[in-house]
Image (cartoon, grey):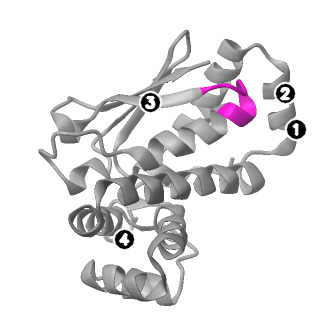
C-alpha cells in the first residue's frame, strides 16, 4: 500500500480521507440515477466542485459525511445500499490495482486464511486514514474475523438512524478479503454507531 499520511491536514488540522470515498460514490451514483440527479445531489451537499474535477488527493472527511447525509435523505434505502456497495467494490478494485503490491498479493493468496487475514488487517491499519479519516480502525483475525471502525465519517452522517449504514465499508472489505484471503469470504456489519453501537463492527466469515 502507499506510504501513510496523517488523517489531519498539517496546516489546518482538518480531518481528511482518501478521494475514493468521493470518486467511487460519484461513479456509482451516476450509474444508478444518471448525471443530472447526481449533479443535483452533489450540489445539495455543497460538493459540486468534486464532481466537476474529481479530487486527486485527500479531501476533508466532512465532505464524505455531507454527501452521505444528503444521499440518505434523498434516496430510497435499496438504491442507497446498491450505490454504496458498488462504490465500495470499486474502491476495493482500486486498492488492488494501485495500492497493494502484486508480490504481496501473491504471498497473501498462498497463506491459510487466518494468517493472511492477520497480515491484511495490519496493512489496512497502517493506511486506515484512507477510508476511516480520523476514525479509529482495528481488526482481529480469526473465525470469524472482526473489523472495527469507530468515529468514521459515514456513520456520522445519520446518527440515530436505527439501522446499519456502512454498506460502503462492508463492500470494500469484502472485495479485499475475497481476492486476498478466501474466495467465499462475506462481510456483514453486525453493529453500527448509527444504530446505537459503540463502534461499527464488521464480521468476516468464509
Residue contact between numbered discs 2 and 3, judged by CB atoms under 8 Å: no
For residue 188, which numbered disc appears in the image?
3
Residue under label 1: 103
Secondary structure type for disc 2: helix
Q: Disc 3 and disc 1: Cα gap in Å?
A: 29 Å
How many marks can you see? 4
**Front tag of 4 and 3:** 3
Look at 47% across and 84% down and name the residue there: 51
Mark closer to the observer (4, 1): 1
Task: Find the distance from the CA under tag 4 to the CA under tag 2.
Answer: 39 Å
Up the image or down, 22 lies above or below 82; here it is below
Q: Are marks 2 and 1 in contact (CB under 8 Å)?
A: yes
The answer to if 61 sits in the magenta stretch is no
Q: Which mark is residue 107?
A: 2
Query: x%, y% of residue 148?
Result: 39, 30
Q: Secondary structure at mark 3?
A: strand
Q: Position of residue 21 (x, y in %)?
A: 47, 61
Front-most of 166 and 83?
83
Amino acid at each position: 500500500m502507499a506510504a501513510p499520511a496523517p488523517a489531519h491536514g498539517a496546516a489546518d488540522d482538518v480531518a481528511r480521507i482518501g478521494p475514493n470515498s468521493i470518486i467511487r460514490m460519484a461513479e456509482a451514483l451516476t450509474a444508478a440515477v444518471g448525471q443530472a440527479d447526481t449533479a443535483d445531489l452533489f450540489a445539495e451537499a455543497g460538493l459540486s466542485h468534486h464532481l466537476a474535477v474529481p479530487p486527486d488527493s485527500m479531501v476533508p472527511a466532512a465532505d464524505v459525511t455531507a454527501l452521505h447525509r444528503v444521499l440518505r435523505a434523498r434516496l430510497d434505502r435499496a438504491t442507497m445500499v446498491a450505490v454504496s456497495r458498488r462504490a465500495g467494490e470499486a474502491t476495493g478494485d482500486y486498492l488492488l490495482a494501485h495500492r497493494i503490491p502484486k508480490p504481496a498479493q501473491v504471498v497473501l493468496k498462498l497463506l491459510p486464511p487466518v494468517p493472511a487475514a492477520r497480515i491484511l488487517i495490519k496493512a489496512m491499519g497502517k493506511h486506515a486514514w484512507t477510508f476511516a479519516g480520523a476514525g479509529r480502525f482495528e481488526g482481529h483475525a480469526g473465525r470469524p474475523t472482526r473489523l472495527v471502525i469507530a468515529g468514521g465519517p459515514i456513520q456520522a452522517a445519520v446518527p440515530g438512524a436505527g439501522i446499519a449504514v456502512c454498506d460502503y465499508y462492508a463492500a470494500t472489505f469484502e472485495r479485499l478479503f475475497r481476492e486476498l484471503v478466501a474466495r467465499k469470504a462475506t462481510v456483514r456489519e453486525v453493529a453500527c454507531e448509527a444504530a446505537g453501537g459503540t463502534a461499527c463492527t464488521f464480521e468476516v466469515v468464509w
